[in-house]
C-alpha cells in the first residue's frame, strides 16, 4: 500500500451518501479545491470535533473555492445520526470498504474493529493531490483553519501550486 503524493491524481472512489446517491471522487469535487476527510467512525471524539469544525467553516471554505466530503465505514443509520447531531453541512459517505479505500489511497486501517484511520486530502481543482495527512491513530488530522489558510496561500502564490 503506497501513500498518495503531491501531484498524483486522486483515485476514483465511490461510496454511498447519507440520504441517497453516491459520492464519486474526485469527480464530485472537480473545478473546486476538494477536502476529503476519512474518519474513524461516529464513536470517535476526535473525528466528531474535526467534522464539526469543518461544518462550521463551510461558508469560509466555499469563499476560498473548496468543497468538503467525509466518509467512514459506519452504516447509513449511524452516519445519518452523526450528520444530524453535528449538523454537518457537506456530503457524508457511509459503508465504505476500508480495505478497498486503503489499497487506493494508502490510508491506515485498524484491524479489530475494522475501520479507516483518520486520513485527509486537499485536492486541486483538477483532482490532483496537493496535501495528504495520514494518521495511524486517533490524532493527527486536517484542521479546517489550516486548510483555509493553505488554499488561500496556494491561490495567491501561483508558484506554490
Image (cartoon, grey):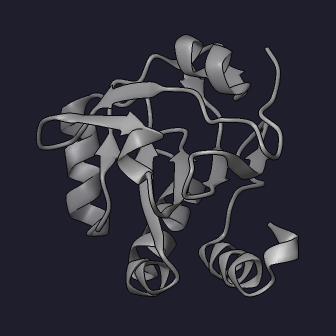
Quadrant (top left, top right, bottom left, bottom right) of the C terminus: bottom right
Extreme-right residue of the structure: 159
Q: Residue at x 47, y 59 (%)?
A: 48
Quadrant (top left, top right, bottom left, bottom right) of the N terminus: top right
List x then y, in percent, for residue 92: 33, 47
Is 100 left, or right, of 74 in this rendering? right
Q: Residue at x 40, y 41 (%)?
A: 27
In the rendered image, the vertical position of residue 136 relative to residue 50, given as above or below: above
Pick the front one: 39 or 10: 10
Pick the front one: 70 or 118: 70
Extreme-left residue of the structure: 20
Q: How many marks?
A: 0
Pick the front one: 70 or 112: 70
In the rendered image, the vertical position of residue 35 relative to residue 2, given as above or below: below
List x then y, in percent, for residue 104: 63, 19
Q: Residue at x 79, y 77 (%)?
A: 158
In the rendered image, the vertical position of residue 53 relative to residue 11, given as above or below: below
Extreme-front residue of the structure: 158
Is 17 left, or right, of 116 in this rendering? left
Q: Residue at x 32, y 66 (%)?
A: 86
List x then y, in percent, for residue 116: 59, 29
Rendering quarter of residue 152: bottom right
Pick the front one: 137 or 18: 18
List x then y, in percent, for residue 159: 87, 74
Amino acid at each position: 500500500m503506497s501513500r498518495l503524493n503531491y501531484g498524483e491524481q486522486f483515485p476514483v472512489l465511490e461510496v454511498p451518501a447519507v440520504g441517497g446517491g453516491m459520492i464519486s471522487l474526485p469527480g464530485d469535487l472537480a473545478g473546486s479545491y476538494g477536502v476529503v476527510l476519512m474518519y474513524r467512525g461516529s464513536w470517535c471524539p476526535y473525528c466528531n470535533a474535526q467534522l464539526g469544525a469543518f461544518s462550521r467553516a463551510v461558508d469560509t471554505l466555499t469563499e476560498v473555492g473548496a468543497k468538503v466530503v467525509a466518509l467512514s465505514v459506519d452504516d447509513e443509520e449511524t452516519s445519518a445520526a452523526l450528520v444530524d447531531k453535528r449538523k454537518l453541512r457537506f456530503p457524508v459517505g457511509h459503508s465504505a470498504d476500508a480495505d478497498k479505500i486503503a489499497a487506493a489511497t494508502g490510508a491506515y486501517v485498524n484491524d479489530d474493529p475494522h475501520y479507516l484511520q483518520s486520513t485527509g486530502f486537499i485536492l486541486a481543482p483538477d483532482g490532483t493531490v496537493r496535501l495528504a495527512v495520514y494518521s495511524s491513530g486517533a490524532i493527527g488530522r486536517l484542521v479546517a483553519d489550516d486548510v483555509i489558510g493553505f488554499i488561500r496561500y496556494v491561490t495567491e502564490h501561483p508558484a506554490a501550486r
